Amino acid sequence: NFAVDDCWAVKSGRDNTTGQIIPDPTKFPSGIIGLADQIHALGLKVGIYGSAGTETCGGYPAQIGHEYLDAATFAAWGIDYLKYDNCYVPANWTDKYVACVPDQWQTYGPYINGSCNASTSDPPVGYDWASSNTSHRYAIMRDALLAQNRTILFSLCEWGQADVPSWGNATGNSWRISGDISPWWARIAEIMNENSFILNSVNFWGHNDADMLEIG
């Protein structure tokens, strides 16, 4: 299978008439639909990248506020898989509480808003993380994908935030359980160790995502 990651769209914005996101014509002269046709002709599936924020991590147009339009566009292009990132989240969509991810609380530019050490971030006992803004942001795209006449696997790239193992399986097909991987054995082992403690929510249809293995 083949997946296109960030930076595939025109960076300056969307189509002024349709509001659709625009594939970069230099990188993809036949568009994403042309690329998808070629990949499908090989008997493979094709994935694409988006983000539940105002911009992708690379600063390209993202999906928040455009979920149904973009889901329909992805379906029309023949997309089979969506990796949905977590950059540039608007202030009104940030979470009231923070669920600590052991490796994650570093400075990642637009990625992180909050501190694991802040006592004010602790949720009350029994707090339902499915009611969090993070869960709701990803649920909007889930519903948008389900509304299409095409099966698109939904990969939640929310960096393990908002106690995603407690609600991820009701939202997507996979969910990231940590911050980004890196091409070092210590980092790989760290993520595998974290994953081993949160397997209760995993089943045939839903899986913890340990991020893509990097070979450097």
Image (cartoon, rainbow, N blue to C red):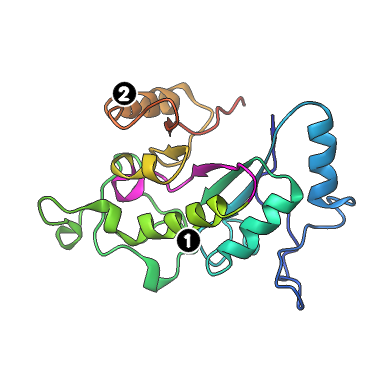
Q: Which residues are magenta?
A: 149-164
Direction from residue 102 to residue 27 in the image, left or right:
right
Instruction: List x then y, in percent, for residue 75.
Output: 68, 50
The amino acid type of the residue labelled 2 equals Ser
At x 65%, y 40%, the residue is: 80
Judged from the image, the secondary structure of the residue bearing numbered disc 1 is loop
Question: Which residue extends farthest left?
Answer: 125
Direction from residue 1 to residue 34 in the image, left or right:
right
Direction from residue 22 to residue 188 in the image, left or right:
left
Q: Is residue 86 visible?
A: no
Camera-nearest residue between 70 and 158: 70
Instruction: List x then y, in percent, for residue 77.
Output: 75, 50
At x 44%, y 25%, the residue is: 188
Residue hosting label 2: 196
Label 1 and label 2: CA atoms lie apart by: 29 Å
Instruction: List x then y, in percent, for residue 98.
Output: 26, 55
Question: Which residue extends farthest right?
Answer: 29
At x 71%, y 64%, the residue is: 21
Is 210 included in the stretch rendered in magenta?
no
The amino acid type of the residue labelled 1 equals Pro
Direction from residue 116 to residue 135 in the image, left or right:
right
Mark 1 vs mark 2, foreground winner is 2
- Nearer the N terminus, badge 1 or badge 2? 1
Residue hosting label 1: 110
